[in-house]
Image: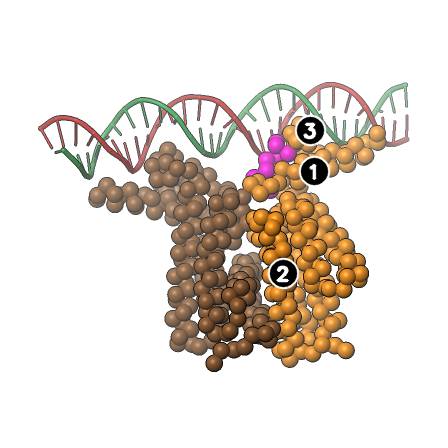
Chain colours: A orange, B brown, C green, D red
DNA sequence: CACTTTAGCTTACAACTGTTCGCTCATTCT
DNA sequence: AGAATGAGCGAACAGTTGTAAGCTAAAGTG
């Protein structure tokens, strides 16, 4: 096995170990370098061959989580083309992600208000990708100032995110309720915004 | 000084020490019993005379934070009577609380998605007080099913809370923008909900 | 082939953690 | 007055943490 290949492999082992240790009861901040190294099957000191410290690993995790989220978005767009219902499809796709990758979503959720400004910034950037893309869509569908499209997109993303957070602590039989509640809320926003000096395009 | 009096005094010293150590860079989970005891001016072991463990202290902090928040609500209601503008007054009052007691707000914000189910539950309950009260108000002002009033109240509280979170990382000159953005979002919700099969009362 | 590079290891250290034990001694109760 | 209570203390324990120093051995390089 090539050197670089092997290095990448244990790097992934570290990342996977970190992800797998995240849970409802264990946040990234409560992971220890030694524990992660142990699960990755390397000596504690070998960790430093790959990351300068835990913070660097953490930022990597946030990046990867953001990547997954963006892939999700692409997937949602495909579904929308076949399905038609924009809001419902988006929310359902998102909820599937949250319940299927709860550790990943929890990372973003927690570090969004965590103790590291760098982490908070990284998460905020990932979320802004969502917001920007949704705002773009809204601008296409309606005639309104950019500022308002952005404010509307932000509200929508927050509400969807929050529904995901609720789902983490709710029993699965409530997912349906959470989804339809969020759909209602987003429709209100859409109608309210459309009524306040904006017109549907076309 | 009476015995009970003195005990209550050092209990407060512990609570105050804990609050004062919370900051943007330090969450409750990263406080140590010893550090808190040190700042409270007692021996580490004396801590146990007042709390079984750090979790018990944490729940006490969440309770106190919730109390402050409810006092704030009462204060907002007084202002509304003199001022008239419900939404604007409520948000401005809330933003003043967030910026003036940022450590307290941060505690709620973080433990809402923290690693302890007990903490998450405690914060959720405090927030539900807000939601229930707002839903009550909405039911009085409009004719609509309880379910929808609650969904609307929840969306509003989430958006206001989120604006507070944004304020924590924003420079003071942006508070005005955050406030007016949130007002816009809440108005959209109100109008959207009113337009969807609901009528203003009276 | 000899030479360099480097991922991973072992050992070691100092700093901190939560918690137990047994003591003191001022307040309270009888 | 005498006994009981209980807040606070110091010493000590076993456990964990991050990280520094220096070695080994395999992969890459000329």
Mark 3 residue element: loop
> Which label's residue is closer to the chain start, 1 or 2?
1
**What range is drawn magenta here?**
A28-36
Q: Is residue B96 visible?
A: no
* Percent x, y of residue C6: 76, 32
Q: Dot 3 corresponds to which residue?
A: A41
Q: Which of the 4 image quarters holds residue A178? A: bottom right
Mark 2 residue element: helix
> Which label's residue is closer to the chain start, 2 or 3?
3
> Which residue lies at the image location 38% right of the left edge and 48% below the top edge?
B16
Q: Nearer the viewer, mark 1 or mark 2?
A: 2
> Which residue lies at the image location 52% right of the left edge and 78% below the top edge?
B200
**The N terminus of chain B lies in quadrant:** top left
Mark 1 residue element: helix
Chain where mark 1 sits: A
> Which label's residue is closer to the chain start, 1 or 3?
1
* Percent x, y of residue A200: 71, 76
Q: Are the residues under badges 2 and 3 in a single subunit?
A: yes
* Percent x, y of residue B145: 53, 68
Instruction: Tell me: residue C6, above or below residue A112.
Output: above
Residue A158 is marked as none
Q: Which of the 4 image quarters holds residue B37? A: top left
Q: Nearer the viewer, mark 2 or mark 3?
A: 2
> Which residue lies at the image location 25% right of the left edge and 45% below the top edge?
B5
Instruction: Tell me: residue A22, above or below residue D30.
Output: below
Q: Dot 1 corresponds to which residue?
A: A16
């Amino acid at each position: 096995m090539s050197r670089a290949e092997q290095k990448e492999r244990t790097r992934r082992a570290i990342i996977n170990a970190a992800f797998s240790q995240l849970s409802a009861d264990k946040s990234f901040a409560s992971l220890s370098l030694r524990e992660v190294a142990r699960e990755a099957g390397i000596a504690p000191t070998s960790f430093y061959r790959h990351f300068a410290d835990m913070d660097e690993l953490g930022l990597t995790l946030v990046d990867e989580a953001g990547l997954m989220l963006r892939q999700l978005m692409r997937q949602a767009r495909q579904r929308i083309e076949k399905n038609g219902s924009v809001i419902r499809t988006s929310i359902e796709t998102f909820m599937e992600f949250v319940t299927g990758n709860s550790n990943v979503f929890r990372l973003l959720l927690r570090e969004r208000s965590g103790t590291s400004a760098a982490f908070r910034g990284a998460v905020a950037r990932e979320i802004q990708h969502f917001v920007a893309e949704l705002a773009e869509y809204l601008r296409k569908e309606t005639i309104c100032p950019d500022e308002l499209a952005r404010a509307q997109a932000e509200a929508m993303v927050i509400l969807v995110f929050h529904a995901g957070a609720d789902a983490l602590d709710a029993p699965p039989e409530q997912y349906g309720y959470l989804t339809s509640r969020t759909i209602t809320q987003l429709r209100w926003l859409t109608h309210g915004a459309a009524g306040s000096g904006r017109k549907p395009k076309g």
